Image: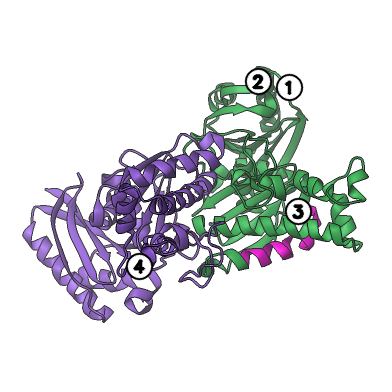
Chain colours: A green, B purple
C-alpha cells in the first residue's frame, strides 16, 4: 500500500487538482471551471477527491494541500480573494469537513514555489525564491525548506516592492512604481507602447515585444533589457534579505527563456551583496501543475 | 533542578557570555577581550562555561548558542570573520569538543534578532525583522519563529541592499549605494558633512547630528529625515518579501528613539504593499545582551 496526497490549485478561472504519490508522480489530475459560489466549489472539490480516492484504492491518502489566490497567514483561512470575490473563507475547515482529510492551505504563488522545490526546477534546494512573471509579478519564498507565509500571509509579495523604475506608473495595489509595473507582461507592453510602431499595435503582447527584440528591433531590445534589469535588481534585494541558493523564474513571460534570464542574472550580479553572488537562476519546470505538486508536497516534505 | 543554556556573543573586541535559565533570566554573565587566536578564545569560553556551570549546580545545562560576526549557513561553521581575521572555523566542533555540550552557531545579527524575539521587544511575535543601525546596518529575519540564515549564511544582510539614495557612494562591501551607505551612523555623518558647519567638525558623530536636529538645525533635520526615509523604504521592501509583524530597531543610532522611528514608520507606510501596513516599529530592548539571550533561546524556543 502506497501513500498519496491531494494537491488542489484554486484559481480565478479553474480549479486544478490531482492525487500525487510520495515519489511525486501525479496518479491522476482533473480540472473544472471555478464555480462562483464557494460552497459549490468545495462540494465539487470533495466529490472529485472521493472519485480519485476510489480510483486508487491501493493508496492511503494523507491529506490535501490547497493553493488559493489570496493571503493565508495560518495554513487554514484565506483573507479575501479578489479574483473569486471571496472575503475571509475557512478553506481548511470547509474542505476538511467534506473530505475527512487534514487540509493545509497556502497562497497559490507560495505553493507553486514549494512545488518547484519538491519536484521541479528547485529539486534538492531548501532555500529558493520563485518569481512568477505574468500579468503581474508574484513570488514565493522558501527558507530552509519551509514557505515564508509572513504575518498577514503576504510573504513573497515581491511584485509590490518599490523599485526606482517608472515611479509615476500606478499599480493595481494602489501605489506607484512597484516591481510589477515595470517587470510584468503588462509593464513590458506599456513600456513598448512608448515607441513606434508598438504605440499603434492593437492586442500587443509581451511575446510580441520579445519576438521583435529577437528580430532586431532596438526599441524592443531596450524594453526587454529594462524589464530584465528591473527584475534582476529586485532579485538582488531579495538576495540580501533571504539569501536563496536559487531563483526559479516562471509565469508566461518566462517562455522567453534565456533572452530574459541572461540579463536578469547580469543585473543580479551587479547589485547583490557579493557573498550572495553564487545564486543560480533557472526556468520553472512544472508549468501550471506546480500548485498540485506543492499542495501534495506540504504533506510529503 | 532547573534547566539553563549558554548564550555566547563573539565580537571583534569582546566575548560576552551568560548562563540563562528557561524563563529567560541571566543567572550570571561575564565578558572578556576577544583573543586574536581562535584556539585561545575557545579555551577561554570553555573555561568560563565550566566555572559558570560549577556556580549553578542546580541547573542542567542543555547547550550553548553562539553568535559570530560572519556568515553561518549550517548552525556550525562560520565562513570567515573579517573583524576577527578568521577564515572558515568550525565553531560548533571546537566548542562542543571543549564543553561536551551541543553547540549551535548563528550570525550575530541574526542571533540578536532571535534574542529580541524570545525576551526583548519582539516577545510574543514569530515574524519579525531586526534592523541594527550602527556603524553599518545589520539585520536579522525571523520567519515563523525561526532564523532565516539563508543558503550562504547571508540571510538578513539588509544593509547591503541597493537603494536609490547616494548611488555613487562606495560601501565597504565593494558596491555603491547600499542601504548602510545612507542609513548608518557613518552615512548620517557623511551626509551631514555636506553642510556647514558640520563640514568643519572633527570627530562628528551621528549623535551630534541628531542633537543638532533637535536644536532646530534645518540641515541636520534634513539629514535625519533622509536617513530615516531610506530606512523606512528598505523596511517596506523587506515587508514585501517576508511580511513581518514587527520591526525591532536597535544599534547605536536607535538611541535617537522616536526622532528616528516616527519618520521610518511614515516612509514604510508610503512604500509598503498595503496588506503589510499593520507592521509595528519598536526599539530593541536588550541592548548588547541580545546575543546572550538569542544564544540560549536557540535551545529554549
Q: Pointer 4 indicates a residue of which chain?
A: B
Viewer-closest of A31 and A193: A193
Q: Quadrant of residue B138?
A: bottom left
Q: Quadrant of residue A57?
A: top right
What is the spatial separation of the Cα atoms under label 3 and label 4, in whole angstroms? 38 Å
For residue B204, side relative to residue A38 (left or right): left
Viewer-closest of B78 and A277: A277
Q: Are marks 1 and 3 on the same chain?
A: yes
Q: Are marks 2 and 1 on the same chain?
A: yes
Residue B69 marker: 4
Q: Which of label 1 and label 3 is nearer to you? A: 3
Does the CB distance between marks 1 and 3 fall below 8 Å? Answer: no
What is the spatial separation of the Cα atoms under label 4 and label 2, in whole angstroms? 51 Å
- Total numbered labels: 4
The crowd level at tag 2 (other Cα within 10 Å; few <14, some 14-19, many 20+) is some
What is the spatial separation of the Cα atoms under label 1 and label 3, in whole angstroms? 29 Å
Residue A4 locus on image (x, y percent): 61, 41
Viewer-closest of B262 and B38: B262
Q: Can residue A2 be seen? A: no
Circle 2 residue: A38
* B149 drawn magenta: no
Label 3 sits on a secondary structure element that is: helix
Does the CB distance between marks 2 and 1 fall below 8 Å? Answer: yes
Label 2 sits on a secondary structure element that is: helix
The crowd level at tag 1 (other Cα within 10 Å; few <14, some 14-19, many 20+) is some
Circle 1 residue: A35
Magenta span: A254-269
Residue A254 marker: 3
Label 1 sits on a secondary structure element that is: loop
Residue B280 locus on image (x, y percent): 40, 38
What is the spatial separation of the Cα atoms under label 1 and label 4, in whole angstroms? 54 Å
Q: Are marks 3 and 4 on the same chain?
A: no
Amino acid at each position: 500500500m502506497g501513500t498519496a496526497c491531494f494537491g488542489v490549485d484554486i484559481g480565478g478561472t479553474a480549479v486544478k487538482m490531482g492525487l500525487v504519490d510520495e515519489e511525486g508522480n501525479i496518479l491522476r489530475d482533473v480540472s473544472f471551471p471555478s464555480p462562483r459560489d464557494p460552497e459549490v466549489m468545495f462540494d465539487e472539490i470533495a466529490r472529485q477527491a472521493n472519485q480519485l480516492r476510489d480510483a486508487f484504492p491501493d493508496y492511503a491518502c494523507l491529506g490535501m494541500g490547497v493553493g488559493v489566490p489570496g493571503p493565508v497567514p495560518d495554513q487554514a483561512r484565506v483573507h479575501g480573494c479578489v479574483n473569486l470575490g471571496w472575503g475571509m473563507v475557512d478553506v481548511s475547515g470547509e474542505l476538511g469537513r467534506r473530505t475527512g482529510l487534514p487540509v493545509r492551505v497556502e497562497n497559490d504563488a507560495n505553493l507553486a514555489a514549494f512545488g518547484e522545490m519538491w519536484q521541479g526546477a528547485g529539486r534538492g534546494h531548501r532555500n529558493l525564491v520563485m518569481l512568477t512573471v505574468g500579468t503581474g509579478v508574484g513570488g514565493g519564498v522558501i527558507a530552509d525548506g519551509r514557505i515564508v507565509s509572513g504575518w498577514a500571509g503576504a510573504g513573497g509579495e515581491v511584485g509590490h516592492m518599490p523599485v526606482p523604475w517608472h515611479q509615476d506608473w500606478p499599480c493595481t495595489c494602489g501605489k506607484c512604481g512597484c516591481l510589477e509595473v515595470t517587470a510584468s507582461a503588462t509593464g513590458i507592453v506599456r513600456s513598448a507602447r512608448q515607441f513606434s510602431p508598438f504605440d499603434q499595435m492593437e492586442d500587443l503582447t509581451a511575446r510580441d515585444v520579445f519576438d521583435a527584440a529577437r528580430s532586431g528591433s532596438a526599441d524592443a531590445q531596450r524594453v526587454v533589457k529594462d524589464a530584465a534589469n528591473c527584475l534582476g535588481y529586485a532579485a538582488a534585494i531579495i538576495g540580501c534579505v533571504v539569501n536563496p541558493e536559487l531563483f526559479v523564474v516562471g509565469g508566461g513571460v518566462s517562455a522567453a527563456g534565456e533572452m530574459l534570464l541572461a540579463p536578469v542574472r547580469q543585473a543580479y550580479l551587479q547589485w547583490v551583496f557579493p557573498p550572495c553572488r553564487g545564486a543560480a537562476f533557472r526556468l520553472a519546470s512544472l508549468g501550471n501543475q506546480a500548485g498540485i505538486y506543492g499542495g501534495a508536497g506540504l504533506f510529503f516534505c
